[in-house]
Amino acid sequence: MDDTLSPNDLRQQRIDNLESLRDAGYTPYGSAFKRDGRFEELSEAYEEGKSIRLAGRLVTRREMGKSVFAHLQDGSGRIQIYLKKNQIGEDAFAALKRVDLGDHLGITGTWFTTRTGEQTVQVEEWTLLSKSLLPMPDKWSGLEDVEIRYRQRYLDLIANPDVRKVFNQRIAIVREIRSFLNERKFDEVETPMMQSIPGGAAATPFQTHYNALSMEMFLRIAPELYLKRLLVGGFDRVFELNRNFRNEGLSRNHNPEFTMLEIYEAYGNRESMQTLIQDLLLHLADTVIGSRKVGTEEEPVDLDHWREVPYDDLIRERAGEDFFDLDEAGQRERAESMGCHVDPSWGPVEVTQEIFEKCIEKTLVDPTLVTRLPAELVPLAKPCVDDPSKVDVFELIIGGKEIAPGYNELNDPLLQRERLQAQAGEDAMKFDADFLCALEHGMPPAGGMGVGIDRLVMLLTGSEAIRDVILFPQMKLRS
């Protein structure tokens, strides 16, 4: 490739090569090619002299007079190929001059090992499967521009093997989650993504219009209320790997479209969910990552070191043993002295939560189960038996981020109605009367939990931004 050519000239040069190949009898966008397997599988089954058929994208080429060494790449790895003029014929060798990096080739040949010990395919015949009209990034040495990496993820996957590894690990994590829960007799279900009332969390929904029913609808912010309806209906153990949508900000830890795992177990409780999430995380670390030491180099996480601590104890550790003895003015003053922003309209719960979010959460690196939260923060959870101002929940914080909240689910329909009415205020959109109707038919005691899959993948793969673990993250349109 000539680095002095403009992008338009490079594209035209490739179109010219396409036409030359077509004139030589090659079909630039050919039919399917029967291959013997993906490169990883083929390499593992290597046998000297064995015939083989493979297909992939041309990513490197080194010409040596009457022979060419090159590499093909597929979704599992790379394989070296070797083409000799006297082996494939003069016309086929001449046509190679018109093949560009990025083109997809089908190869028929035999295995051999080079003097340097590299598995290589001696090509007997090649065919063109697809012509690339635009050049690959930076001669395949890597794609560094973060903006391009996110907007054109396909180039990122081609050019950066570490990126492909992260997404392969994400695929494996989701697969292992399903396997783990299936083995424990949890049933995977699906609930509506369009809802007339967005419930199950406090968040701003995306709104749309349903033409056929002439009504406003909302993309779900959480599946919780529908999954609890299934507990009422007799499902004992359910889970959903679901897409949620929240019309809120973008950040290193937030994307408006994200993936959650929600799990509910009839006759379980907060403790059973704690056991489940600990077992699940250790299973994923062992089977997918191969280590219980995860996180980033700057902030390593030890998944063998878990701590359980009440919310109020963490507040006292950071804001002072006397914090809950202070009056409202004193608590506000203490919070501001710690660098927290305190809105004049906030009460004690909001002030305390600001301290937790701004001064405490980010310091919890190894797995920490924060329990006994204020009831106002979690209206769908059951009160603690010894103190109804607290709810029997945990928030699992790892690497300074919330990974999973888990509850002893509230199944008292009268108390649930009272809490939801208080939360909704005069906003009828936030009040799901049908859910309360279901609850009044009797929901068994249950444990429930939500796991943020994107953040979990960030943790296990050591990725620093949520966009690094989402194949196509939300981006602002180019101006």
Image (cartoon, rainbow, N blue to C red):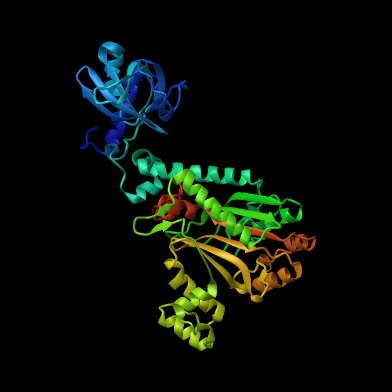
* Percent position of residue 322, x then y: 49, 85
Q: Is residue 302 above or below residue 14?
A: below
Above or below, comparing residue 17 to residue 196 in the picture: above
| Residue lying furthest front | 304
Disc tally is 0
| Nearer to us in this view, 375 or 222 | 375
Quadrant in the rendering for residue 35? top left
Q: Is residue 161 above or below residue 263?
A: above
Q: Position of residue 84 (x, y in %)?
A: 26, 16
Residue reaching furthest to the right: 441
Residue 395 sits in which quadrant?
bottom right
Position of the N terminus, as image quadrant, is top left
Foreground of the two, 155 or 261 = 261
The answer to whether residue 237 is above or below residue 88 is: below
| Towards the viewer: 242 or 219 | 242
Task: State the image coordinates of residue 75 (x, y, percent, origin top left).
Answer: 42, 34
Q: Is residue 339 left or right of residue 307?
A: left
Query: Residue drawn 34% across and 50% down?
Result: 146
Residue 369 in view of the camera = yes
Residue 354 in view here: no
Q: What residue is shown at x 37% (from left), y 47% (from top)?
A: 149
Q: Position of residue 273 (x, y in %)?
A: 61, 58
Residue at image x 59%, y 54%? 276
Residue at image point 38% right, 54% down: 479
